[in-house]
Image (spheres, grey):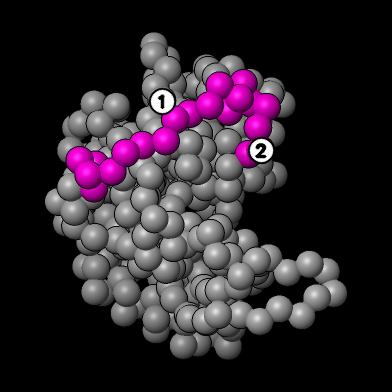
Amino acid sequence: MGLNATDTLIGVAEFPTCGSKVEYRDRSVMAGGQVATTCVACGTWGLSARYVGKFGDDYAAEIHANAFKSAGVEMQIIAVPEQSSLHNVILIDKSGDRTVLCQRDERMVLQPEELKREWIVNARVLHVDGRDTAAATQAAAWAREAGVPVTADLDDPYPGIDELLENVDYLLVNNDFSHRLMDEPNLERCLRRMQVLYNCRVTAATLGEHGVMAWDGKRMYQSAAYRVPVADTTGAGDIFRAGFIYGLLQGWPLEKQLDFSCAAAAMNCMAAGARGGISTVAAVEKLMTEYARYDIPDSIIAGTSPASQS
């Protein structure tokens, strides 16, 4: 349950400076959005998936509906008449790094009263991104009452997020979020403190090309990213979360979950768009045997290097 967006991807040689005029290489329109992309990946890998979200009544809603149907994802859509769906503009430089210009419209915020409990409590996992914080909090509370584990992909400490975090079992954040939430420069201490404070089963921080670090209350895990040719980093974090959910539902040990998630994210980076590189489970596992991996520098662990965007 969470965000969807239609992405306009614009390829540029380098990020424009203020006041400049820059030629772009290409432009394309694709479906994206954090939870929506995660759902499509899960559906593609054979999981039964349901997406709960909000759309306008424009062509973008049709793009998403077709993508969900193609991946076998059930839709529970709250439609807003005479309103445009959310749209992002994403600049992609020659190295594949992306800069997202995202849209926020209060009319497209999912409200708790728009949810139905039965959409949530018959799942094996609930995944939220926290942007629609009040609705995500309600859904997570229902899930907790029903014994449904909750995974969360959070990138900003939105107002009211503490109540949501109290019902999250697997907290999957980016590096920057963990430091901001805990007001702590050391990543290991961030993960340990989050796990204790919110009583999570696992806390993890994604680190872009440096992979992921995770803490399960007993052991600190480090899983390095795979060295693949990067076309576009858009959606890497969303596909990482899909990989984590897939591994969780297979009953894999955490170390294998993290490795598979890193490989799935890497594969997506080899094509354009938030979902351009989604492939089969077998293809992800093959990638794990064919590509070398990056190292995780000590500076990342200490929290002294630039934060990841993933």
Q: Which mark is residue 21?
A: none
Q: Please give left or right for residue 12 compared with residue 248 in the image.
A: right
Give the spatial CA distance, label 2 vs label 1: 18 Å
Residue at the image position 43 percent from the left and 73 percent from the top:
31
- Queried whether the magenta region covers residue 272, the answer comes back as no
Q: Secondary structure at mark 1?
A: strand
Q: Which residue is mark 2?
A: 306
The answer to which image quadrant residue 69 occupies is bottom left
The image shows residue 164, relative to residue 282, as above or below, that is above
Q: What's under tag 1, amino acid-wise?
A: Gln
The image shows residue 246, relative to residue 256, as above or below, that is below
Q: Please give left or right for residue 50 compared with residue 302 in the image.
A: left
Horizontal and vertical percent position of residue 35? 43, 57
The earlier-in-sequence mark between 2 and 1 is: 1
Q: Is residue 134 visible?
A: no
Q: Is residue 303 visible?
A: yes
The answer to which image quadrant residue 247 occupies is top left
Horizontal and vertical percent position of residue 9? 53, 74
Q: What's under tag 2, amino acid-wise?
A: Pro
Residue at the image position 37 percent from the left and 65 percent from the top:
271
Q: Decide which of 62, 52 is in the foreground and name it.
A: 62
Q: Which residue is mark 1?
A: 222
The magenta stretch is: 287-307
Q: Please give left or right for residue 288 compared with residue 146 in the image.
A: left
Q: Please give left or right for residue 217 compared with residue 148 in the image.
A: right
The image shows residue 18, relative to residue 234, as above or below, that is below
Residue at the image position 76 percent from the left and 80 percent from the top:
21
The image shows residue 234, relative to residue 70, as above or below, that is above
